[in-house]
Image (tube, helix red, strand yellow):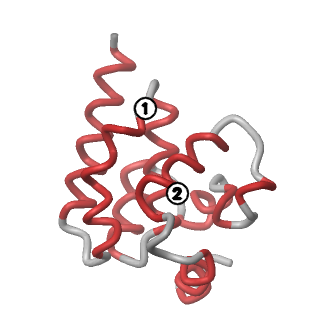
Amino acid sequence: MEDTTELQRITRLIVDAMHISTDRVTAAGAANVAALKLENFAQGIHFARCIAAFTTDDTLANDLAEIVGESPKFLLSKVLLANFAPEQCTGEHADLEKRIWTSIYAGRRERSRVQKTLGRRSLI
């Protein structure tokens, strides 16, 4: 029960931050978060990591890193899709990353744009 409460709390924080993002794709994608069906607090934390990695909003990325208590570089190292093509991603949160990418970003943003943003932030 406590895990569910914490998941709801962190998801609410992330969605609220997404709504006010200067990245229009991320802001619009906030409406799709419920469809992700996050199951536990660990997925909530990873959701924050993914949004921080995929958004072009530097302030949002920094805020999410602060929410999860990780440095931006460490946070990024946990997001496989930021470093590898989707078909190369396997592991505990690979499916979640693919669902986030598909429901919030796919079709509206290319991987190259995300890579440029991460390069600008000096994270890759």
Image location (x, y in percent) of residue 47: 46, 46
Q: Kindly identify the residue that appears in the image at 34 percent across and 63 percent down.
A: 63
Pointer 1 or 2: first along the chain: 1
Q: On the picture, is 91 further left or further right than 4? A: right
Q: Characterize the local packing of mark 1: few (<14), some (14-19) or many (20 or more) Cα atoms within 10 angstroms.
A: some
Question: Which residue is found at the position 74% from the left and 64% from the top?
Answer: 85
Q: Which mark is residue 24?
A: none
Q: Secondary structure at mark 2?
A: helix
Q: State which quarter of the image contains the N terminus.
A: top left
**Helix, strand or loop at mark 1:** loop
Give the number of the disc on residue 101. Answer: 2
Residue at the image point whose x is 63% and y is 40% from the top: 95
Callout count? 2
Tell me how far mark 1 sits from mark 2, CA to CA. 14 Å
Left-right relation of 87 to 94: right
Q: Give the quadrant of the C terminus.
A: bottom right
Query: Looking at the picture, how far across and down is residue 79, in whole percent?
Result: 63, 55
**111 shown above or below 113:** above
Dot 2 crowding, Cα within 10 Å, few <14, some 14–19, many 20+: some
Residue 32: % across, % down? 32, 49
Q: Which residue is mark 1?
A: 38
Disc 1 residue type (three-letter)? Leu
- Residue placed most toward the observer, 18 or 35: 35
Above or below, 30 against 91 in this view is below
**Residue 28 relative to residue 115: left or right:** left
Nearest to viewer (mark 1 / mark 2): 2
Return the x and y of residue 57 as percentages of the image width and height.
Answer: 36, 76
